[in-house]
Amino acid sequence: MKGNYMRRIDDLGRIWIPKGILSKMFSKDEYFEGYPMNMFLEDNRNIIICKNKPAARFCEWKYNTNLQQAESNCDNISIDQETFKKLKYCPYCGKEIKRKEI
């Protein structure tokens, strides 16, 4: 599967997501038709679409100054300092990020 797709927005404001992308997002056991998805706008330019999954009550990110990485309670992920500074919303749950330094 190629990694770059271009789709046009139809007259109802919809964008068709290729089945190849959806099948990579979902496991073989999951059926993606009708599955709830989270969407949010980042930097007024990029639309982030992710699976709606049970997450923590809020998305709390902690910045570890020793490791120069940010860690989240959402999906146990960590990212570098540059990316962390740019994020306003969690790319996994779509909630606004609460920042703490450790």
Image: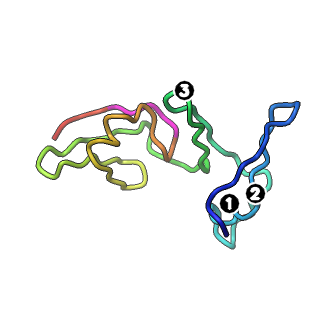
Q: Amino acid at mark 3?
A: Asn
Residue 85 x %, y %: 31, 35
Please tell me in which quadrant of the rendered image residue 100 appears. top left
Label 2 neighbour load within 10 Å: few <14, some 14-19, many 20+: few
Range shown magenta:
94-98
Q: Are marks 3 and 1 in contact (CB under 8 Å)?
A: no
State the residue in front, 73 or 22.
22
CA distance separating discs 3 and 1 = 23 Å
Q: What residue is at 36 percent from the left and 54 percent from the top?
A: 77
Please state if 38 lies on the left or on the right of 72 as rendered: right
Residue 44 x %, y %: 54, 26
Q: Amino acid at mark 1?
A: Ile
Q: Decide which of tag 3 and tag 1 comes sooner along the chain.
A: 1
Residue identifier under label 1:
21
Q: Are marks 2 and 1 in contact (CB under 8 Å)?
A: yes
Q: Which mark is residue 44?
A: 3
Q: Which mark is residue 18?
A: 2
Please tell me in which quadrant of the rendered image residue 40 appears. top right
Residue 89 x %, y %: 45, 34
Which SS class for mark 1? Answer: helix
Q: What residue is at 64 percent from the left and 56 percent from the top?
A: 4
Please state if 99 lies on the left or on the right of 27 as rendered: left
Q: Amino acid at mark 2?
A: Pro
Label 1 neighbour load within 10 Å: few <14, some 14-19, many 20+: some
Q: In the rendered image, which quarter contains the N terminus?
A: bottom right
